[in-house]
Amino acid sequence: MQKTWVKIILFLLFCFPSLTIAESPSPYAGKKILHVASYHEGFEWTDGINRGIETGLKDKGIEYKVFYMDTKRNPTEAWKQAATEKAKAFLEEFKPDVVITSDDDAAKYLIVPNYKDVDLPIVFCGINWDASPYGFPDKNITGMLEVELIPAIIGHLKQHAKGERIGTLTIEGLTERKIVQKYMDILNIPITQSYFAKTFDEWKDSFLKLQSEVDMLIVLNYVGIADWDTQAAIKFVEENTRIPAGASFPWLVPLTLLGITNIPEEQGLWSAQTALKILDGTKPADIPIAQNKDGKLFINMRVADKLGVQFNRSLLKMAEIIR
């Protein structure tokens, strides 16, 4: 008798597919997550974080939105304050169950004055080195710090440098000054000379000065220089490089000998997974602050040829090569 019923059920399911048992809805159906990005869409770091978040939330039934504060291209205090008000209004209208923020400005301008020690869970990512100046973690706030793999980069550069002096070159900005200071304070790296450029000409002048002022160079972010020209910068570097330089972001490697880069998708994926834990009932205060661990090696053979640097085959096999 039981076999007969099984045959009947299978026959009905085959003939009438609409009778199949419906999949149970996702436990996250109807939930909302908002990502407040400090920077802009099209900025490679921010886009990578977004990809990581989207991967972590895929097929979860969650409504996901992004608000871009765009403070990298617009670093004035007036813009940041206006962007904060717009972000707050967007958040209040969307009413997310969890907010993810990326990089410093979203934390400093939006979260600290408005959403600390409240019921709304916050997951930050991309804050450089140390979140304690913002009072993080808090009862409703946890996140992942962004720690650059600078000691490993310097270790590689030293093999091709004539001395120990280290310099840095980046844009004028809060985050960039903080990063350089953390190199010295946390990593105990002695920085001989640092330049913070506001224009492309300033950047080029600083690059030239550093060729004789230091023995190794760390090239940091250039996004935010209004008249920046990437192709012109690459040509300028290849014509004027005399010391080994390194970078910790892939879009900077064309300006350097090598890079060991952070992976923005790691920050985004961790943030998404943490947001899901919070939606499952874990309190943010019970989730420890994390640090990124993954890195990727790049070698720029165009600059290597200019400097006469030869890398061993085993290292080349591990790296992504730029030619």
Image (cartoon, helix red, strand yellow):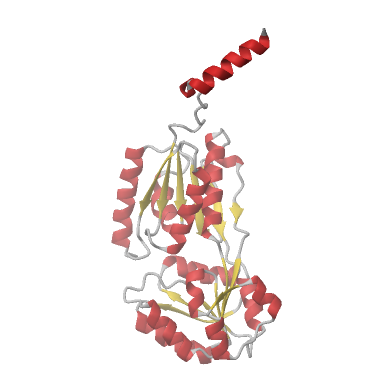
Q: Identify which residue is drawn at 62% across, 69% down.
A: 187
Quadrant position of the N terminus in the picture:
top right
Report if residue 180 is visible in the image. Answer: yes
- Asked whether, in this view, residue 8 is left or right of residue 33, the answer is right
In the displayed structure, 204 sits above or below 143; it is below
Q: Nearer the viewer, residue 158 or 17?
A: 17
Residue 26 position within the rendered picture, expressed as x and y whole percent measured from the top left: 51, 31
Q: Identify which residue is drawn at 33% across, 58% down.
A: 80
- Asked whether, in this view, residue 175 is left or right of residue 224, the answer is right
Q: Quadrant of residue 71 in the image? A: bottom left
In the displayed structure, 54 sits above or below 186; it is above
Q: Identify which residue is drawn at 30% across, 60% down.
A: 79
Residue 222 position within the rendered picture, expressed as x and y whole percent measured from the top left: 42, 73
In the displayed structure, 237 sits above or below 278; it is below
In the displayed structure, 321 sits above or below 130; it is below
Q: Quadrant of residue 118 in the image? A: top left
- Asked whether, in this view, residue 257 is left or right of residue 109, the answer is right
Q: Nearer the viewer, residue 103 or 138?
A: 103
Report if residue 220 is visible in the image. Answer: no
Q: Nearer the viewer, residue 176 or 33?
A: 33
Residue 239 position within the rendered picture, expressed as x and y whole percent measured from the top left: 46, 90
Q: Nearer the viewer, residue 69 or 117?
A: 69
Q: Quadrant of residue 93 in the image? A: top left
Please count the marks in the image: 0
